Amino acid sequence: MNLEVLPQDCISHIISCSSPQDACRSAMVSATARRAGDSDLVWERFLPADYEQILSRLVSPLVFSSKKELYFKLCNPLLIDEGKKSFSISKATGKICYMLSARDLSITWSSNSLYWSWKPLLQSRFAEAVELRTICWLEIQGKIKTSMLSPNTIYQAYLVVKFSNRAYGLDSLPSEISLVVGIKHESHGIVYLRCRESNKIFSVKTRSGKGEEERFPCKREDGWMEIELGEFYNDDDGGDEEVKMSLREVKGPHLKGGLIIEGIEIRPKD
């Protein structure tokens, strides 16, 4: 079929029913398809439904001349809510991703400088991260509403951390991890943060009903490490459930320190 005989709005509508990747590929078909594929009609369809509200929460306003330009600018993490969260979308799908900063988490005794130290880190997207000085009661929790996320999407939550050279006591007992979505989903597990003294690499051991599995935390492209807290399916039932994600080790009286926390990331499963 010759696309040239179709109105550009019609071609744009067809492309908007595909995906961002297909919209980009359409530019290789013809000049007509490229113009249609670059239109605001197409790229507004790929943007989150509440993108205007997201833009109003940005720490630094975005300048853009088209919805396509806006789409690709949103693919890079942007600070929102006074810098306490970052927001981005998947370049391939437009699905929403959030990271809750350490300041946006509930960390037991984090306001007490005897136990935790807040400081800026060049490697962090946020103004500051927090380092555990010494404590016996380790408890970290983050919350987010399902309405803030993309519907019909499997999400995974990750605690994003580093370990200082002085890290100690993190492997004496396993930490408990959990992810709870309202009353319809709940998952639990344990992780060992264990240091191999020879090369300072930390390993993570997880356990489920099917047995134990030992693995290493994934190193992220931004230089941090991440520990999966769980996953859940965000359906399209119109509800607004609260997602609670946590890591805690409160059973042992021993001291621990050297854990550096950037935040908790909630992103679509690959």
Image (cartoon, grey):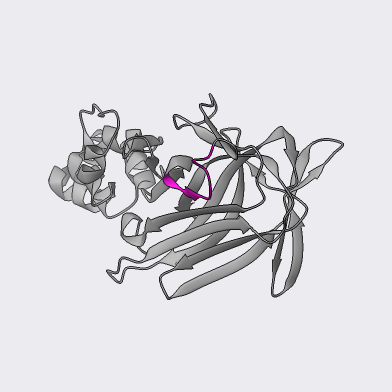
Residue 55, by quadrant, is top left
Boundaries of the magenta span: 104-112
The residue at the far top in this view is 122
In this orientation, which residue lies closer to the viewer: 141 or 255? Answer: 255
Residue drawn 51% across and 71% down? Answer: 186
Residue 108 among magenta residues: yes
The answer to whether residue 92 shows anywhere in this view is no
**Residue 246: image x %, image y %?**
54, 57
Q: Does the magenta stretch include residue 105?
A: yes
Q: Nearer the viewer, residue 32 or 73?
A: 73
Given residues 163 and 148, the one toward you in this image is 163
Q: In the rendering, at what x and y percent does residue 230 appear? A: 55, 61
Q: Which residue is drawn at 56% across and 48% down?
A: 159
Q: Which residue is drawn at 72% across and 74% down?
A: 210
Which quadrant would residue 188 be assigned to in this image? bottom right
- Residue 146, quarter of picture: bottom left
**Is residue 145 something that shows in the picture?**
yes
Expressed as whole percent of the image width and height from the top left, the position of residue 24 reads: 35, 39
The chief SS type of the magenta part is loop
x, y (%) of residue 140?
Answer: 54, 52
Q: Is residue 209 left or right of residue 109?
A: right
Q: How many labels does the image show?
A: 0
